[in-house]
Image (spheres, rainbow, N blue to C red):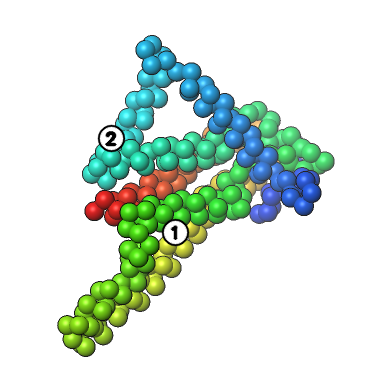
């Protein structure tokens, strides 16, 4: 009586149609909707008045200033914080809108195209979270290369200069320093692990949230969906903040290494 037949979502997003050989999936359409929302918000923000700021504008400025102060305390440098905060805010904003857009637009999740759901949270698709994490980690690597140059970047992982220097001191000291090379290989693996962990953390939590909502919708259509949707929205907010915090940590480490 209080049940709705709901098809449990699949791990792979449904392909709605093809443009030539390019598949248009339900997460891709959500990405388009998210991008349009971000563009509209940017145009709206550009209309803010410098001389006569509104209350909402003051709240937004307080939020950004507070975030800069918070990152400044973590990095012990306001200059580092000013470099990081715009990137982090962009990431958090896009992910948050992507996570919440189906909750904020009534019945958006129920819209279908040829019997397939037209929208699905982009962050519940590993094809979205993996490239996003790859871009964040790659940016941190490029920031390091920018001032340390390519040799400094390579010596960060494979300190051949340190090994050669110790070999000049003696064979025993040189052979003991070879362990630094193995540690360097582990550091390289660690950089790839950052991509995997960053993407799978966001994907796993959001996919599990959607799956849980579908399960409860199929069992209790009237009473439980509202609190589950609220919990899903809260989870979407938390995951966006966590992704942004981890991205800030990676970028901060690279920039601080550059400056030091």
Q: Secondary structure at mark 1?
A: helix
Q: Are marks 1 and 2 in contact (CB under 8 Å)?
A: no
Compared with residue 206, is residue 68 higher up or lower down, i.e. above or below? Answer: above
Residue located at (55% from left, 53% from top): 131
Question: Residue 166 shows which numbered tag?
Answer: none
Dot 1 or dot 2, earlier in sequence: 2
| Observer-nearest of 11 and 189 | 189
x and y percent of residue 228 in the render? 57, 38
In this picture, residue 65 sits left or right of residue 116:
left
* CA separation in Å, label 1 and label 2: 26 Å
Quick one: which residue is furthest to the left in this view?
Answer: 169
Indicate the quadrant where residue 111 lies.
top right
x and y percent of residue 235 in the render? 50, 41
Q: Secondary structure at mark 2?
A: helix
The residue under label 1 is 194
Residue located at (38% from left, 62% from top): 150
Q: Quick one: quadrant of the N terminus?
A: top right
Compared with residue 18, is residue 104 higher up or lower down, i.e. above or below? Answer: above
The residue under label 2 is 69
In this picture, residue 7 sits left or right of residue 69:
right
């Amino acid at each position: 009586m209080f049940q709705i037949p709901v098809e449990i979502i699949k791990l792979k997003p449904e392909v709605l149609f093809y443009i030539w050989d390019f598949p248009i999936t339900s997460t891709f359409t959500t990405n388009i909707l998210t991008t349009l929302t971000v563009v509209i918000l940017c145009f709206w923000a550009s209309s803010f008045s410098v001389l006569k700021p509104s209350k909402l504008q003051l709240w937004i400025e307080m939020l950004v200033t507070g975030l800069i102060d918070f990152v400044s305390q973590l990095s012990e440098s306001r200059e580092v914080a000013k470099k990081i905060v715009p990137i982090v805010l962009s990431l958090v904003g896009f992910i948050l809108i992507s996570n919440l857009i189906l909750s904020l637009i009534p019945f958006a999740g129920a819209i279908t195209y040829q019997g397939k759901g037209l929208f699905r949270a982009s962050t519940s698709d590993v094809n979205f979270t993996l490239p996003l994490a790859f871009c964040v980690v790659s940016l941190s690597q490029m920031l390091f290369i920018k001032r340390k140059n390519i040799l400094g970047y390579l010596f960060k992982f494979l300190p051949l200069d340190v090994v050669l220097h110790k070999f000049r001191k003696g064979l025993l000291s040189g052979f003991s320093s070879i362990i630094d090379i193995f540690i360097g290989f582990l550091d390289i693996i660690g950089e790839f692990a950052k991509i995997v962990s960053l993407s799978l953390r966001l994907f796993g939590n959001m996919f599990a949230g959607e799956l849980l909502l579908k399960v409860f919708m199929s069992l209790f259509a009237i009473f439980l969906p509202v609190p589950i949707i609220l919990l899903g929205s809260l989870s979407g907010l938390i995951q966006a903040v966590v992704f942004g915090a981890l991205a800030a940590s990676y970028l901060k480490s690279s920039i601080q290494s550059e400056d030091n």
